[in-house]
Amino acid sequence: MDPLESYLAKVKERAYAITDADVQAVKDAGISEDEIFEQTVAVAVQEGRRRIAAAERVITGVGSTEPAKSTGADVRGTGAGL
């Protein structure tokens, strides 16, 4: 597994454990900071949506495997939007 793939797997599975050394290893492999940032955000958002969908399935008892579609509504119910 190349350094970027290894780093992104760690972001997905244990983001709390990412260290400066992890990021430096990816940079040392020739990946730009911009690319690292974009890939990190993409993986983190994807994993977050997956976890939210899993929680919704548990709460509602529905077997959907797709993340819920966002309505843009404010979760506090104020109607202020996101």
Image: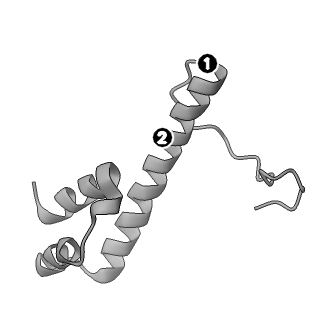
Residue 59 x/y as whole percent = 63, 26
- The amino acid pointed to by label 1 is Val
Judged from the image, the secondary structure of the residue bearing numbered disc 1 is: loop
Mark 1 surroundings: few (<14), some (14-19) or many (≥20) residues within 10 A: few
Tell me: residue 9, above or below residue 32. above
Q: Which of the two labelled residues, at mark 1 and mark 2, occupies the earlier sequence position?
A: 2
**Quadrant where the image shows the N terminus:** bottom left
* For the residues bearing labels 1 and 2, Cβ distance under 8 angstroms: no
Residue underneath mark 2? 50
Q: Which colour scheme is used?
A: one colour
Residue 6 x/y as whole percent = 17, 57
Q: Which label was assigned to residue 5?
A: none
**Quadrant where the image shows the C terminus:** bottom right
Q: Residue at x 87, y 62 (%)?
A: 80
Residue 67 x/y as whole percent = 56, 37
Q: Which residue is drawn at 66% across and 22% down?
A: 60
Residue underneath mark 1? 62
